[in-house]
Structure formats: C-alpha cells, structure tokens
Image (cartoon, rainbow, N blue to C red):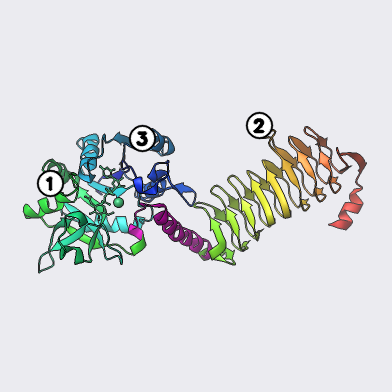
Amino acid sequence: MPRSLAVVCLAAGLGKRTKVSIPKVLLPLCGRTLAGSALDVTDALLPDRTIVLVHHQADKVQRALANRTSVTFVDQGKPMGTGHAVKAAMHALGDFDGDVLVIYGDCPLMTTATLSALRLARGTAPCAMLTAYPSDTDGLGRILRDEAGRLLGIREAKDCSKDQLLIDEINAGFYCFDARALGPALQTLKPNNAQGEYYLTDVIAQFVAEGRDVATIEAEADDEILGVNSLADLAVARLVMQERILMEHLHNGVIITDPSTTFIDHGVKIGADTRILPCTVIGVGCTIGKHCEVGPFAHLRAGTVLEDGAEIGNFVEAKKTLVGAGSKAKHLTYLGDTVIGKNANIGAGTITANYDGVNKHETRIGDRVFIGSGTVIVAPSQLGADSMTGAGAVVKPNTLIGDREVWVGVPARLKKTRDLRSIKEHS
Ligand code: UD1
Ligand code: CA
C-alpha cells in the first residue's frame, strides 16, 4: 500500500524584504498567488492532509486560500524558526503516520516530478532532502559531508565558518520525512544559533547522530528551488513561470509569434492553430478555441471565451465576454460583460458601456450582427440576429433591437429593417 502523505507548507514568515503591504505568499504570479502555485504542485500528489502554517496577516492568507479543498490552517504563533513551524504542524497532524512533505509558501516553481522523486528517495530513511548547486549560494544553508560524502548535517549561512561558506552544495528547503521519526527529533531542537531560532535543519544532524542515514537528491533545475524574498525575485520567478506556460501552449500547437512580449496566465486553455500575436495579455480564466487570432496588442481578461475562429485585434479589451464562433472585433474596442453570437462583426471603436457607476450590466449581440464603427452600446441592451448599427450610433440602455433592424444616430433609433437577401450578398 502506498504511504499516506501529509503536506506541510510554511507560510507564517513576515516577508519584510518585499516592502509591500500584502503578505509575501499572496504576491501574484501568472494568475495565482505564490502560495497557491506552491500548493497546486503538492495537490497533484493527492495528499491526505495539507497543513498551512500562517501567522502574519493570517486572516488575509487564509481568506485567499480558503477555496482550496482539505487545507488545515494552523496559526504558528510568533514564528520562531522553521523547526518551530513544523512542530506546530505535527501537533495538528496528531497521530498521522506516513510521509511528511515540507515545502515553503514562497517557493512557487517546484515541480511535482521532483517532489515525487523526493518521496521515492526516502525509502526507509527518516528523511530525504533536496539539495542544489546554485550559482548564488548567498544566505543558504550549506550541506556538510564527511570525506566519504556521507551527509553530516546542514549549517545555516549565518552560522558557517569562512571555509564552510565555500561549500557549493546547499539545502533547498524541501524535505520528505517519516512522520514517526520527525516527531521525536523535533523535541530535541534548541535555538542555539546565530538567529536564536528553532532550525528544522538541525533534525538532520540528529538523525545522523542516531546512526540513521538521510537520503539526498538534487533538484532537476536551479529555478525549481527559487524562493521569493523580494520583488526582484518575484520578477525572476515570473519569467520562469511564464516560459513554462508559453512552452506548453507551443507544444499544443498554439502559434505564439513573440513569446517575449506575450503574457498568458496559468490555466488558460487555447486550441490548436490559434495565433497569438505580439504584445498580448491573456488573463487567468480565459478560454480560446481553435483557429482564433488574438492581438497584436490585445487584452483578454477573466471570464472571456473565444469560440473557434473568433478574432480579436489591436487595442481590443474583452472582459467576461463570449465571442461566438467566427465573430470579429479587430480594432480599438471594449467588450465587457458581453455575449456575442456567431459571425458577428464588431466595428472599430465599438464600446459596450457596461458600468453605470454602481452596477455592471450585460450586452447581448446576436448572430451575424454588424456593429458600425464608433458605436456605443449602453448596457443592458440587446441586439437581435442580423441587426446593424450605423457609424457613431449611441444605443441607450434597455434598448431591444429586433432581428434585422438597422439603428442609427444619437440616441440610436430604428431606421429600417434589413432585407435578408441583401445580407446574403454581403456574407
Ligand atoms: C531555510 C533553511 C536553509 C535553506 C533555505 C532554502 C532553516 C533553518 N534553514 O532558510 O537551510 O537553505 O531555507 O530556502 O530551515 N517560516 C515560517 N515560520 C517560521 C520560520 C519560517 O513559516 O517560524 C517560513 C518562511 O515564511 C519562509 C520559509 O519558512 O517561507 C523559510 O524560512 P526562512 O526563515 O526564510 O528560512 P531561510 O533562512 O531561507
Ligand atoms: Ca527564505
């Protein structure tokens, strides 16, 4: 039977170095928070329990992560070190038996594959830990080994001698513990170090002193272990995460002309043969079909859906909008809370005025509608199939434009009803 799994995510630290007011673990990264990204990685391992340690701005962190299933939040109290945090988690886990996977809420780039490998590497050892050889080892715990290469322990940078600081193998901060070994080892921790903290890392030397080997594996890539301590780190993490997201779309047959100016959030679905042109921003919660074209300079925001063959062009922003199959909005347009049918043409400079200063309202545009350039549609309004507006028309709120009707002017009024034969000639 596979061993049970408990994930312990450390997110109680203050994050002073970011100098911003929101908790560090809630900083945004391609449509998720740092902690949300970290927990998505462990969720893929289907843990039996997930404990998130919180303290600083605990209510905010808890609220932001509240929609996750089976997470238990534990207030660590005043954070007194990583060992103190894991002790609080073990208390919450009670008599849990199995693997305890320790991760940080500020390390969003870890992969499920590496964490699976870490679990496998533990075997019967009390612990398997992840090490790495990054180019910059500043501030990281150094791995101490004997001449035979056997692991002896971890020394925090602040406690290292000059010679020890030259060690290039560092502790990445990810561990898989045997719950039964971890509990007792935590009891022995003492804050006898430069920072006066309870170091989780001291349990490693404790296991070694008991004659028990600790397994180590190396991270697959340097970027996996990147921890975000500052906004500069966040910018680096974003680049890595963005590249991963774009690579996945490229592998799926999405044509992305210039990845360096394309911003696509996590979880966006895009069909094959769709072209994403430069300087385009696609937010979390968008879905794009096959054979679509987006950009250049387009902005798709949460809840926007493009059906197959839809086209969104330069300086077009769409929010919570459904663009039906084959419909086009190619220039200088805002579409908010709008439902557009199939094969409609939204003229240059069209605005759906969805906000009355208090509430947002919906605009419905039927199949094959032709919106003249510079039309403003004040929501809520509805335009029937095959209807049309003239250039510069201002459609007042609560207007119901019937099928095939042509409305013009300011405010827009019915001019005539279109003859279906002439519509056929156009299409
Ligand atoms: C820790 C490791 C170090 C390793 C490094 C990798 C220890 C003692 N040191 O150092 O060997 O190289 O990670 O990044 O473990 N946290 C809490 N509660 C606490 C203390 C910390 O939740 O009481 C959280 C922090 O918010 C942070 C994470 O744990 O997300 C790591 O803590 P931090 O103090 O930054 O440890 P490092 O000094 O980076
Ligand atoms: Ca850190």
Q: Earlier in the sequence, mark 3 or mark 1?
A: 3
Q: Quadrant of residue 355?
A: top right
CA neighbours of label 3 inside 10 A, class few (<14), some (14 to 19), many (20+)? some
Q: Which numbered mark, 1 or 2, is in the foreground of this view?
A: 1
Is 237 contained in the magenta span?
yes
3D distance between C-alphas at marks 1 and 2: 58 Å
The mark found on residue 192 in the picture is: 1
Residue under the image location 23 percent in, 42 percent down: 86
Say left or right for 234 vs 308: left
The single residue placed furthest to the bottom in the displayed view is: 147
Q: Which numbered mark, 3 or 1, is in the foreground of this view?
A: 1
What secondary structure characterizes most of the magenta part?
A: helix
| Amino acid type of the residue tagged 2 in the rendering | Asn
Q: Is residue 174 above or below residue 191?
A: below
Return the residue nearer the eye: 381 or 4.
381
Q: Position of residue 134 (x, y in %)?
A: 30, 65
Q: Position of residue 253 (x, y in %)?
A: 56, 65
Circle 2 is placed at which residue position? 359
The mark found on residue 58 in the picture is: 3
3D distance between C-alphas at marks 3 and 1: 28 Å
The mark found on residue 205 in the picture is: none
Q: Earlier in the sequence, mark 1 or mark 2?
A: 1
User: Cβ(mark 3) to ligand 1 < 8 Å?
Assistant: no
Report the span colored magenta.
224-250
Is 33 contained in the magenta span?
no
The single residue placed furthest to the left in the displayed view is: 210
Q: Position of residue 8 (x, y in %)?
A: 28, 44
Q: Is residue 310 above or below residue 94?
A: below
| Amino acid type of the residue tagged 3 in the rendering | Ala
Residue under the image location 30 percent in, 49 percent down: 103
